[in-house]
Amino acid sequence: MTDSEHPNADPEPDTRVDTFPAYDADPGDHRAILDEFATEQGWDKHTWPHDTTHVIHASQTLRIQFLNDADPREDAWTIAAYDTPVSDRTWHLTLTADTPTPILKRLLTILAEEDWGPADFITDKTIAQATRPLLDAAWQPTPPGRWLHWKPLHRTVHLSLDAFAARDPDSTLIAWTISAGTYINRPDWAINASTHTPADLLTRLAEELAHGTGTRRTARRSAQRITQTAAALPPEPSRGPSAPPRR
């Protein structure tokens, strides 16, 4: 009898694929996604040093840096825009290694759709533009404060804005954060965007958050194996009739 046939062996996981909101989907193979993007879009790709892949637009003003062996909750991606090939970067985003596949793919598609060189200042108008898809999907805003948050009811995904960073037009600090997880200070995955990230880019990403879907593998125990295991357990000892109460 093999281990898998033994009645006391652990049941093998029965994996199925279910549909979830985009922010709850599996991360997939980020390196394969990057390689496919570079090939399809014709961006120049280099690896240096051995653990970092660089993918660069023909204009050299939009660049992607990917750490091949990043920890799942650490930043694996840095996407940066420049006014000229030799200028300082004007805005940037970072993504952790466990960012869900549909969110990542949508962001890469957005990057390839047009020239994202010019940066935007954060104003009431750009905030309203970037968050409109979330409000249309009934995400709830928090009262004004240092941090502004938008989230759906009964979910642990957020879009957050650091109002302090947003007030400084010359700031290169992180202003926007998209994250998911029970603990906002240690999210399951996160995207951070600097102050001047274009509002239209953020709006399109918010549309994916609000309406996008993806897949996730979930493991469950086979019902047949659970039944087999239960049948193999020894029966409970029979209990005789209760003694009559003492008088």
Image (tube, grey):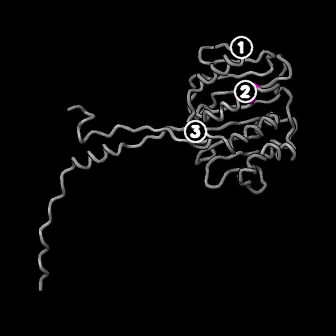
Residue 137 located within the stretch drawn in magenta: no
Residue 235: horizontal and vertical position, in percent? 18, 55
* Residue 25, numbered label: 3
Element carrying mark 2: strand
Question: Marks 2 and 1: which is nearer the front?
Answer: 1
At label 1, the amino acid type is Asp
Element carrying mark 1: strand
Q: Which residues are magenta?
A: 108-112
Q: Quadrant of the N terminus?
A: top left
User: Is 211 situated above or below 153?
Assistant: above
Residue 156: horizontal and vertical position, in percent? 61, 49
Marks 2 and 3, how far apart in space? 22 Å
Q: Quadrant of residue 119?
A: top right
Depth order, front residue of 3/213: 213
Q: Earlier in the sequence, mark 1 or mark 3?
A: 3
Question: Marks 1 and 3: which is nearer the front?
Answer: 3
Q: Quadrant of residue 208?
A: top right
Residue position for label 1: 44
User: Is 209 situated above or below 104?
Assistant: below
Q: Residues within 10 Å of mark 1 (few under 14, many from 20)?
A: some
* Residue 79, numbered label: 2
Cβ–Cβ below 8 Å for labels 2 and 3?
no
At label 3, the amino acid type is Ala
Q: Horizontally, is 113 left or right of 184 in the view?
A: right
Residue 109 located within the stretch drawn in magenta: yes
At label 2, the amino acid type is Ile
Marks 2 and 1, how far apart in space? 14 Å
Q: Quadrant of the C terminus?
A: bottom left
Element carrying mark 3: loop
Residue at 64 percent of width and 46 percent of height: 157
Marks 1 and 3, how far apart in space? 29 Å
